Amino acid sequence: MKNKGVLVLCTVIITGFLLCTFAITMCAFWDTKTISKKENRRLAENPEFTISRWFNGKYSLELSSFLNDHICGRNEILDMASDYQGLLKQTQSMEIRGNNSDNGDANISDTLILDDRILMLNISNSEYNEKFVKNANKIYKSLPKGIEKYLVLSPSRVEFEEKQFKKYSYDQKKSISYIYQKISNDVTKIDTYTYVEAATKTYDLNKLYFRTDHHWTHLCSAYAANAILQTMGFSMKNPENYNMKSYGGFYGYMYAFNNMTDEDGYVPDNLDVYDIGMDVPEEVHTYDDNGDSVVLNEFVTDPSRAGYYTFVRGSYSHIIIDGKNEGGKNLLMINDSYANTLVTWLTEDYDTIVMVDPRYYKGGKKEFDEMLKEYDIDQFMICLCDPSTQMAVAGELENFTK
Amino acid sequence: MVFSSVIFLGIFLPLSLFLYFIIKNRVWRNMVLLLFSIIFYSWGEPVWVFAMIGLTFLDYIFANLMEKSKNPTVRKILLWVVIVADMFLLFLVKYYNFLVSSFDAWTGLKIPLLHLTMPIGISFFTFQAVTYVVDVYRENARVQKNFFYLLLYISMFPQLIAGPIVRYADIDEQIRNREESLQGFINGMFRFSVGLAKKVVFANYAGEIATTFLVKNLSTSSAAAVWIGITLYTMQLYFDFSGYSDMAIGLGKVFGFDYKENFNYPFTSKSMTEFWARWHISLGTFFRDYVYIPLGGNRRHQMFNLFVVWALTGLWHGASWNFMLWGLYNGLILIIEKILKKKGYDFSTVPVANHLYVLMMMSFGMTFFYFTNLNEIATALKIMYGFTGKIALSLKEQTEVFKYFRLFPIMILANTPIFKNIFGKLFKRDTAVGNTMRTAAFAAIYVFAFVLMLNQTYNPFLYFRF
């Protein structure tokens, strides 16, 4: 008799759990959210039922995704899940996480997770390296006569880390030197490495490179800019002479890329911005959903939200910057995001600077030649961080030659 | 539809249970179960569901004709016709392309391939259909006069897509007469939650690490990583498969069915012969009763019979040469064990070493099972035996291993009956305390597994090729 009562009670409890699951799942049909801020992605929509979509299997797949995305209390459940997963994990003082996710960023290799910083690691990739040399030489060769040619390859943070961490990446100094030798003799190669290395003797590495992001800081880029400007015959003020504003609470891309959370205990970076007096870029070109070139007008301008994108408002197909030296030379750079901070130091000495990011540029040689003409380019520069020469970017340079 | 999904746990299961239990009539309860089984299958296979219904109809007609015929020759012909018809569909969708492409490769011919997707669970329901007609032919089971009941047997959602292979003779009576109970509901749901946890917690996490080592980074992996990867894949397969079987058996109990066990702690085995008697028992007994014994069993051509059975077992798992190799590898080991045993060498009596032997042989065999490409098998073996010079785990590999490290000891223990024995001794089955503890365990496991499931990007369905 006692067991019978327990049997009924237990059955009621189990049924209660099943009903709760049913209720929180059914709530999905009343959920109107379209975006998950927590996961930084668009949520699946409630699919339309049609006979054809049923028979081709799309309806069932999409409805499953919809329910997954809109189940009641999803954010709280995800928090619980990461707590549970934390229970299974053996903490290590050092981790290397692979870029294995299906939606992984092709420009990020493995990452070394340390207690206070995250380092982007790169593996030397001879295939991309050779591609870079070949494509860069091709671009330099195709330039109209009279345009001065420059190459700038700068080191990333891991290059200046202690040996025990540096060993997980490749030797960037050697790589830069190899590429500089292989690039055509009529190209001026600018040694930013030595300048940045010198800065590491003066400043703590955390002042020169972010801990939660894979970029260098505004300060570090000033040292690289100094190397460039000196080569061009300009002089540059010491960055300390500029006013500096510091924005706290900056968690960079490496932090987000590795799905770090507050519980990982990372102290955010400071985003130090030197007031050079550079205005918003005159024109930012990108592409719309149809692949047509468009000019962007709206940007996030608050540094605490824009983070590293504070400097030239982000990475786009091409950005036109109005420099302060009216009547001065016009520079066109093919660059990665390392140049976003660096370029700010160049604006005082140029009339116009055109920044073209090969990762976003969808044009070909024709459009590139038109750009050279339209902006009356005097100087051309490929300006990248060295790890980019080991990645897909090296191959994307080919777009400028065909 | 798979069990470890929101749609199943959040809508399908509660709804099917609700509609099933509000009806009191046995016939209508069976119809509800049939309706939900058809929906369950058509959720993933909206077209092939008709093939399943058609195949069942064929078996229904031929079994009835067999029963009516008193002539043994006619009965035999009818049996072979229906078996060939059943197998023809399986052959077309699963084996035709494999045979044709192998033939083309040898002869240089270009016989066109079929562009058919393989219906999920076809090997399971085809074998169930075969057991029905053979058991009716052998008069081990009564012919089913009600087509819908036969369709229910073939399509029953708890075991439709991942087994166990249920024999008609074992379930015939239960379809007509069975008794659902509160005790069965509690025991069944508890068993279901255990299976769900095996799938979501053990299998998915083990599989996630295995995939990293064996697929994404195989060429750069160290020997230790590939061994760990293969071992974890073996664990993934075991927990996934036995987890599905637990869920099927549990759901069966809830609906009043009593399915036979499909796994019996195979990693506690002391020989490979014992291992295969404990792993996927329903498939092993199917081949024993419907292939091995009719071929002569132990009485004549025993070794040949074993080879045939294991070649077929390999092919059942997938239509490619690696599965054939895997099957023959296992067949060979079993034959060697039998020969050695006959000569008085029985390694299963050597403590500890016997378990290690089973784990090593199983894991090694899994290399053939995991990689469907012969070049990949060669690469993996080269790495595993140190020919690439990378032996120890790199920091990156350590990171992967440590990601779910605390799970490993629990996983090892879960390979033994230790939890079951402790739980069973402390909380006797079907007592007030036992039921209370089972309910509490259900709640904890169910919530834990459901929450983790929602956050998992790696939740594969391993049976697509079976």
Image (spheres, grey):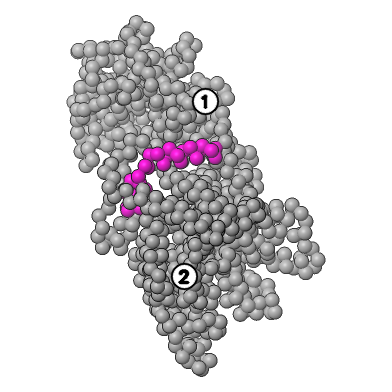
Which is the main secondary structure of the residues drawn in magenta?
helix
Mark 2 lies on residue: B125
Q: Is residue A179 above or below residue A233?
A: below
Return the residue nearer the eye: B104 or B367: B367
In the image, which disc is placed on residue A115? Answer: 1
Label 2 neighbour load within 10 Å: few <14, some 14-19, many 20+: many
Quarter assignment of residue B398: top right
The N terminus of chain A: image quadrant = bottom right
Label 1 neighbour load within 10 Å: few <14, some 14-19, many 20+: few
Q: Which residues are magenta?
A: A62-89
Check residue A72 for magenta coloring: yes
Return the residue nearer the eye: B274 or B410: B410
Q: Amino acid at mark 2?
A: Phe
Q: Amino acid at mark 1?
A: Asp
Quarter assignment of residue A36: top left
Q: Chain of mark 2?
A: B
Residue drawn 43% across the image and 37% down it: A79
Return the residue nearer the eye: B45 or A70: A70
Give the number of callouts.
2
Furthest residue in direction right, as rendered: B344
Residue drawn 48% across the image and 26% down it: A265
Is residue A249 something that shows in the picture? yes
Q: Is residue A117 above or below residue B174?
A: above
Q: CA distance from mark 2 to mark 1?
A: 53 Å
Query: Residue B290: where, in percent of width, then height?
Result: 57, 76
Check residue A133 for magenta coloring: no
Does mark 1 fall on the same chain as mark 2?
A: no
